Amino acid sequence: MRSRVVFLYENFLGGTSAAVSYIAQRLMLRTRFIYRVIKLYNLTGQYKKDHVSKATRKKMLTTRVVKPAHRQILLDYLMTVDSQLYLDDMVALLFDCCHVMYNKQQIYWALKEQNFTHKQVVLHAKEQNERKRNQFVSQIYENPGYTASMMCFFDETHSCTSDARRKYARATRGEPAFKPAFKNNGRSHASSALCLLSIRGMVDVHVYDTSKGGIIKATDVNFSLERFIIATNCNPYPGANSVFFLDNARTHNAETITALCMSHGVLLFFLPPYSYDLNPIELAFHSAKARLKRIHPTVDPDAMLREHLHECLMNSVTPQQACNLFEHCRIPIRIIDRAYADGGLFPSEIDMMDFE
């Protein structure tokens, strides 16, 4: 009976949790028994326990630990070759290299003793040039002529109904969480926003209704920069929001943006390629989208997406949180910059008052 449970769970039903109720109805078994069998199979690779005492089983596990040499082979492979192996892949790897058969539980505890945990993968662009990135940080971010109070970052973000929809729900054990929804045949309501961030928080946000791809035309970007963002929020250097940063998107490399910044006396800098971790506005977008899932209606996701996206972006970060994001992106924050972020005077105005 145990073998039939494992066979159905692995081969026919895809190993999903919803399959437990189906197996229970087909084989006329309790779901609790099925869960125990599957748990034992996932931990040890066996569907039946050995008839030994607890003391003997504990002794078997403690005496057959992963040897230090075998453990080092596994750690070196994870750090240099592939860190996304499953536990059964690690068992097969050690068997091929060392001709010793370990079980999943022994591999798990061996990794845990070395502080190796299972976590979500963060993709790292191979096109990043570390030399250019360090040079940019030393020449621009750490330059005393460009303080954090002068810096502002411009970028666009995109959100559709699938991004604003909550991904998790509650249901009884063994049953999936269903939600009725209209079939949109690939057509989804979406909105894109052009945003400007400083150490005082999100300065300006302009939201557009776009397709599901979320592409904003270059004409719309230039129009927003010329009429609203640069014209109303930026000042000539060395004033507040006088050092303007852009990424290397295709719509940002237009000559009109360079000419617009020069006409307003604003310094324009482009971030190094694939250096989203040096752009604090990217971190603010993560906070805004997490807030969007909380306040956006769950009954009709298409309703008021544009208004809610604008509200979440404007309230995404507080001034102190914005300062922390700047520091996270390797931008030095002085005490006087934090005072300015909380509503104080711009540092140059303080210097003029001291001179008087």
Image (tube, helix red, strand yellow):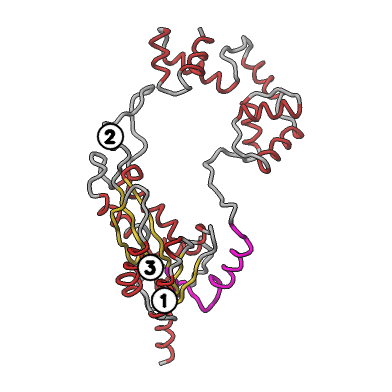
Q: Which element type, helix, strand or loop, lies under badge 1?
A: helix
Residue 106 position, x and y percent, is: 65, 27
Q: Quadrant of residue 354?
A: bottom left
Kindly report the distance in space between the C-alpha atoms of the residues bearing marks 3 and 2.
42 Å
139 inside magenta stretch: yes
Label ID, residue 200: 3
Q: Which element type, helix, strand or loop, lies under badge 3?
A: loop
Question: Which of disc 1 and disc 3 is earlier in sequence?
Answer: 3
Label ID, residue 284: none
Residue at horizontal 40%, vertical 9%? 26
Toward the viewer: 247 or 133? 247
Residue 227 position, x and y percent, is: 30, 72
Q: Amino acid at mark 3?
A: Arg
Say whether residue 337 is visible: no
Q: Amino acid at mark 1?
A: Ala
Q: Quadrant of residue 51?
A: top right
Label ID, residue 183: 2
**Does 322 appear above or below 231?**
above
